[in-house]
Image (tube, coloured by chain):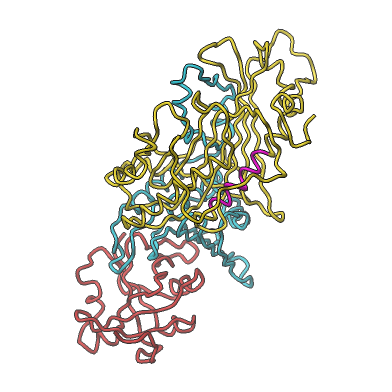
Chain colours: A yellow, B cyan, C red
Amino acid sequence: MNTTPLPAGSQAATRPKDLPNFERPPLNEVVLSIQFATLEKLKSVHIGLLWARFRTQYPDVTEQATINAEFEIFGAPPQPGPRIKFEQLLAPPMPRYWFEKSGKPDLLQVQQDRIIHNWRKHEDEPIYPRYETVRDRFRAEVDQFVSFLDDEKLGELRPNQCEVTYTNIIELEDSESVHDRLPEITSLWTSRLSEPLIDMDFENISIGLQLKMLEAGKPVGRVHVSFQPAVRTSDPSKQVIKLDITARGRPKQETPESAFDFLDLGRRAVVKTFAAVTTPSLHSMWGRTDGNGS
Amino acid sequence: MATAASARSRDFYEMDTSVVRTTRRSNFPNFARHYDAPERKWEVEVVQALARLVKMPAGWDSYNAPQIKRDAGHFALEILQAIMRARTPVPQVVPSAEGGVQLEWHEKGIDLELHVTAPYQWELWFRDLQEPNAEPTSLELTDDFSALKRPISLLTTR
Amino acid sequence: MPPDVDDGSIADDADLLRRIHPEQVVDDKNLGKTRPSSAAFKDPTMSVDAEPILHHYRLDWTFSLRGHSGYSLARFRAGAAREKGLAVIHKPESNNPAHTEVIGKKTGSIAKHLATVSTWAHLESQ
């Protein structure tokens, strides 16, 4: 497939040797996202110029609603309930734009304060090409975006939050009710109740947890884990578990280089968390090869 | 739980014939909102003030002030959403000559000012007038909000 | 362009006038009065009018509000700025002989100090 080449002199990323490794991970989507200080001068009228730089690779463009900015903070308890975003009272900002090629796994998303690359499992690329490949594709796109901003004098890219998300679809054979078999998927759930529930049956089970990423004992980001039941639209009788793991945090400096450093850190956190919250029996099924699986 | 869900191409799940869809979560969000969530009337007032400030044109202060940055307003709201409790007084929301937003409380013997110039770039100034010998606290902050615990607690409970 | 050197030509006891936008007027319940927010004093090159120079040209504080209806006017001594390490430099402009700049980074403490010592030359009704 055509990809935006890496800039001259830059090096392709290499996989750290100490990470859990799976030959057949249940990955369905990987998202790398860089949020930055709003580029007030970037308007819809400029998107055509930007798209021209990616047109060969991504001939299709669509508009989407914008994604709200997210910030990981520490030292304050989480507040429940819905929150108002003051953008709701302002004139609508520039939409989010999808650049893609129909039937292909890669997607590039751009809005005034975010650039995102998605890899989605697809018949053209059913095997996950690995983080390093997806990262290199995204890095080339970000460099092209920075060059565009510079050429059109639209401002400087100043990242303030980065995010890595891995979405996994976990299926078990012969499973009509995945809840009965949740302990086979994750050690976070045991199904052991203090007392029997008479005339009641589990209908849905969702598990959510948050972990702080620490560096020298200080928080540098957060990992959000979510196990949710799901069904296949092609076969609603077949239940699966959707496991989302997101690492999000602030880069050390407001530069693209530092943003990718955080993405690399986030990826490590996501993969380690994935191995920790799933069971050794599934690790075997997924072909764990780093020697720590059963 | 905060995720990158919106960023993901959900439509991909819908359009693909082998796609999955999520079953409805049964975690009683309405129950949590009415029973546990603090009053958020302050939010409407603050959001309206922020929306008003970011619409002011450059030079709004009759000198050379830049427009108030949307990002600064957004992060100021994030701060409040993290720290405000049911009985915490509503702050005054003030534009700054640097294009930032300042949240201020001057009551109950508490002087607290939070000046936000960009996400993760803000300054705290705090003085408890009931401790006249104590030096004011002046801190430059990023993602750690723990310095706000005591001032907000005093404002809320005094 | 004159260099940014404080030559002391504006005396410490000279009053300086700064326009205050309506959104920068705050209610201070601790002091029992309305005063300018410290946010109004955060500009690193803060423009003010030196009142003695206005008087020299037979003008007064109303000159500083000319063409700026709705604004209030705060007054503070040049010495109050200098005691916090700020420079007070007379920089006359073609349409304003009294134009002066208070130069230097204004931390929260410094801006707070200027806001607290200020009095109103004119307070627009809120």
Could you tell whether A194 is left or right of C121 in the image? right
Reply above or below: B93 against A177: below
Quadrant, the N terminus of chain A: top left
User: Residue A147: in sight, yes or no?
Assistant: yes
Quadrant, the C terminus of chain A: top right
Q: Which residues are magenta?
A: A259-271
Q: Residue at x 45, y 64 (%)?
A: C32
- Return the x and y of residue B41 as percentages of the image width and height: 46, 41
- Return the x and y of residue B67 as percentages of the image width and height: 33, 59
Q: Residue at x 31, y 70 (%)?
A: C19
Q: What is the total number of numbered labels drawn onto the structure image?
A: 0
Q: Residue at x 51, y 30 (%)?
A: A120
Reply above or below: A271 against A283: below
Could you tell whether A245 is left or right of C35 in the image? right
- Residues A57 and A145: in front is A57
- Residues A219 and C23: in front is A219
Could you tell whether A81 is left or right of C92 in the image? right
Find residue A78 and report its image quarter: top right
Q: Residue at x 59, y 37 (%)?
A: A130
- Residues A83 and B120: in front is B120
Reply above or below: A211 against C45: above
User: Residue A93: in sight, yes or no?
Assistant: no
Farthest residue toward the top?
Answer: A199
Find residue A227 and report its image quarter: top right
Q: Is residue B96 magenta?
A: no
- Residues B89 and C12: in front is C12
- Return the x and y of residue C59 as percentages of the image width and height: 21, 83
Q: Main secondary structure of the magenta part?
A: helix
